[in-house]
Image (cartoon, grey):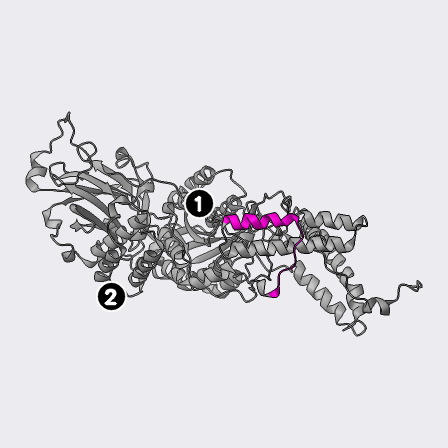
Amino acid sequence: MSDPDFNLDRLSKRPAPEPRPSVAMLAKRDALAAFDEAMKKTSAVPQGSERASRLSHVATKLWSRMMNTKFLSGTAIATLMIAPIAGITAYQLMLTRDGGPALVGEIGLKKDSTTVQPGDNKTVATDEATPLAQPKAEPAKPIDIDRKRAEGADAAKAKSEVDAIASTETRLDAGRLNGGSAATVAEEKLAMDAPAAAPAPSENFAVMNDTAAANQAVGLAAPEAVMAPLPGSPVIERESRDKYPEFKSNNVVAVAEQPVSTFSVDVDTSGYSSMRRTLNIGGIPDRDSVRIEELVNYFPYSYAGPEKAQDAFKANVTVTPTPWNPNTKLLHVGIKGYDLPAAEQKPANLVFLLDVSGSMDEPDKLPLLKSSFRLLVNKLKPTDTVSIVTYAGDAGIVLEPTKVADKAKILSAIDTLQPGGSTAGEAGINAAYALAQKAFVKDGVNRIMLATDGDFNVGAASDEDLKKLVEEKRKTGVFLSILGFGQGNYQDNLMQTLAQNGNGIAAYIDTLSEAEKVLVQEATASLFTIAKDVKIQVEFNPARVSEYRLIGYETRHLNNEDFNNDRVDAGDIGSGHTVTAIYEMTPKGAPGQLNDPLRYKTNNEPDTYTTSTGEYAFVKIRYKLPNEAVSRLVTQPVTDQNAVADLAAAPEDVRFGIAVTAFGQKLRDEDATANYPLADIEKLAASAKGTDAFGYRGEFMKLVRLASGLLPN
């Protein structure tokens, strides 16, 4: 302090040095590297919980106390002296805190996450072990310039080079944002090696926050702190990494070659809400994301149901003309499950397995998840039990088994959830099953509700490993249902696998309204199983039908011999659930058949019974009651008694289901509906809208209109 040059008054009046982009980039890189190193320590507090003080909170309190002292308040000395001290103190806290840094663990980079390099508008994949992707050759120029300065190079010349690069990158990003041609962008890129004048203020541009726009499109409020990037910021091209099971549409089958069709029922609805979200933000759904059976089964139908639980469900069949092909007919099969009265509903033991990893830190993920589960808790009975397990880097128990009578405690636990860390899916599932066994209810409902964006990147090595784990655990009587959130990295293929093998449903929550539908209106169907391992087999009569194809259910196909094998797993039906399946069949002798008749015909003529009764087909359904291991059989012949000559004479539910089936085929660009206009699909749906108490059918017609402006002609 005795050094005359070290004068605090003079120092406080000295102007700040000019900011340098290269130094800023180096500082960010070093900071993230330090954070990544600190992430190796794991917090003892369950990740995703706010109960322990976060480092950001500690640092804020420390800074506030120091800056509000009488001596330092409002002085330049405070800034010059305290800022370095506070920074060093926060860093030391981070390194020495027991259990490792919670804050760093929450914001750390995750495997398969993306970072944006300066001046580059493309996403660059990074690995979990790499704190920050190495800069590309071109964006590295500011570092070289800084080195020149350190070696005594002319400062004015170095500054000119920095300004030239920043100007060129700004113009490149503006060109990309405004849809500039590849040639124009490439031509501008050549200017990277030459100085260029900084752009005039009028050339600056604002980048719209696409996440906020997407949320607004689906009815979600934008976060309060969302701001558009500053002019000159890099434009991020968001490339979706959503994954869906790949499959080919069912072929038209000759009855003479293969008269029997067998499949497992499917009551999942994730395909519909995923499709809806994509259309609402102006996109075209991925072809493999459109599972037609999930579109059709999204809607409630008023099919006739059974009168007692032992019958489980009832089949309703209708034969109608095909609206998109005058030479074929549609066989519509509608199943209605027994609607369990409230008095017969058994106690529920539910474990909420919630993904609170860093990837869930988006408005349509964890915030929506928390609101959704609050709705479910308010629907449950006081005697039901709720537990909460979170996973992010590791699994932790946030709430031990708690009766819903203590609702405030459960809701408080939900409210404390915060995102951070990587995604230890396998560890979370194991912890959830252990907790479910701890509170197991004999002869009741024991179910895990897994809510995630579908990104499992820590734990089991493959989807097959998780599938086997879930298959083993379901034998204990604990089932697994899946609720998906968000987009951009949604692993739908894994979610489908887990739900199907965990004897549960797979739903996709894109809005709070969808959460209310799945978790409130359809709560009994989602939680209470009335029939399991439900399989359908249809045998077509070659005397009346020459060809057929099952529309949808490609991922639910079963071998014919699986139908009578009670060891083969199949879909489950919940209380009051409806299931719809539609076949398109070509009557014998009708024009337009796709399969030529066999030259060397085998002796497969139908017997006199089926010929004389005029049956189109024979429907068989196998199922097991929830606590039984031996299946039961239900049969239903399909005759002219089930047929209508005019589609308009068919029940509303049948017509609406056919309209949804046609729309699904249009989205998948199927040949069958290539000449069937979307306008006709909307008209058919409008004619069968009915009372539409919750507005689902009206919303569907809006989606058809949206698709008409997005799909190629």
Residue 382 visible at all:
no
The residue to which callout 1 is attached is: 243
Query: Residue 69, relative to residue 483: is it above or below?
Result: below
Q: Quadrant of the N terminus?
A: bottom right
For residue 507, the mark is none
For the point 73% across and 55% down, the residue is: 159
Count neighbours of disc 1 (C-alpha within 10 A) and say few if under 14, some if 14 to 19, many if 20 or more.
some
Residue 273 x/y as whole percent = 37, 55
Residue 37 x/y as whole percent = 68, 47
Please state the extent of the stretch shown in magenta in the rendering. 182-201
Residue 597 visible at all:
yes
On whether residue 195 falls in the magenta region, the answer is yes
On whether residue 113 falls in the magenta region, the answer is no
- The local secondary structure at tag 1 comes to loop
The residue to which callout 2 is attached is: 691
Residue 686 x/y as whole percent = 24, 62
Work out how far the residue at label 2 is from the one at label 1, CA to CA, in angstroms: 36 Å
Count neighbours of disc 2 (C-alpha within 10 A) and say few if under 14, some if 14 to 19, many if 20 or more.
few
Q: Which of the 4 image quadrants contains residue 567?
A: top left
- The local secondary structure at tag 2 comes to loop
Q: Which of the 4 image quadrants contains residue 231?
A: bottom right
- Left or right: where 620 falls relative to 588: right
Residue 301 x/y as whole percent = 25, 57
Mark 2 or 1: in front is 1
Query: Residue 591, relative to residue 77: is it above or below?
Result: above
Name the residue type under label 1: Lys
